[in-house]
Image (tube, rainbow, N blue to C red):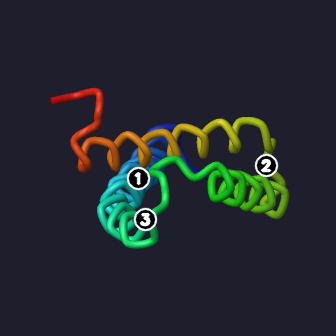
Amino acid sequence: MSSLEEIRAEIQSIDRNIVGLIKKRTELAEKVLESKRKAGLAINDETQNKVVLDRAVDNAIEFNLDTDPVKSIFKILIEMSIERQQELSGKGKFP
């Protein structure tokens, strides 16, 4: 059986990987924005947001996780992507 320190070290590694994946996901906002501009789409695409949330819920169910917290996490990820796209287009909250 693993010691508490070993378990916490594994959690720390997983957390770092999660943050790395969030960074990678956020970096894709530039490509998404370019595609949306070419297609004449708005930055906030409610239809796509629903697709992402539905997929997250389906994945949570598949992994036997509580869907509400998973859905909340993905709402935050969507908000981060929208904000990044707005920043790239000069319409963000931050200079």
Q: Looking at numbered disc 3 in the image, what kind of residue is underneath it?
A: Lys
Sequence order check, earlier mark of 2 and 3: 3
Residue, x 36% and y 54% (percent of image)? 26
49 horizontally vs 34: left or right: right
Residue 9 percent coordinates (x, y): 41, 46
Cα–Cα span, label 1 and label 3: 21 Å
Q: Pick the quarter of the image with the C terminus.
A: top left
- The amino acid beneath tag 2 is Leu
Query: Can you tell which mark lies on residue 7?
Result: none
- Return the x and y of residue 22 as percentages of the image width and height: 41, 52
Image: 64 above or below 84: below
Mark whose residue sits in front, 2 or 1? 1
**Quadrant hosting residue 82:** top left
Residue 32 picture quarter? bottom left
Q: Percent from the top left, x then y, of residue 37?
A: 37, 64
Q: Rounded to the nearest whole Å, what is the CA distance between mark 2 and mark 3?
A: 33 Å
Q: Which mark is residue 65?
A: 2
- Report whether 58 appears left or right of 86: right
Mark nearer the viewer, 1 or 3? 3
Q: Which residue is at 60% across, 40% downward?
A: 75
> Dot 1 corresponds to which residue?
22
Label whose residue precedes the other's in the sequence (2 or 1) = 1
**Which sits in the foreground, 11 or 55?**
55
Label of residue 36 in the image: 3
Which secondary structure lies at badge 3? helix
- The residue type indicated by label 1 comes to Ile
Q: Residue 71 or 83: which is nearer the viewer? A: 83
Single out the residue that lies furthest toward the left.
95
Q: Answer yes or no: do the residues labelled 2 and 3 have beta carbons within 8 Å? A: no
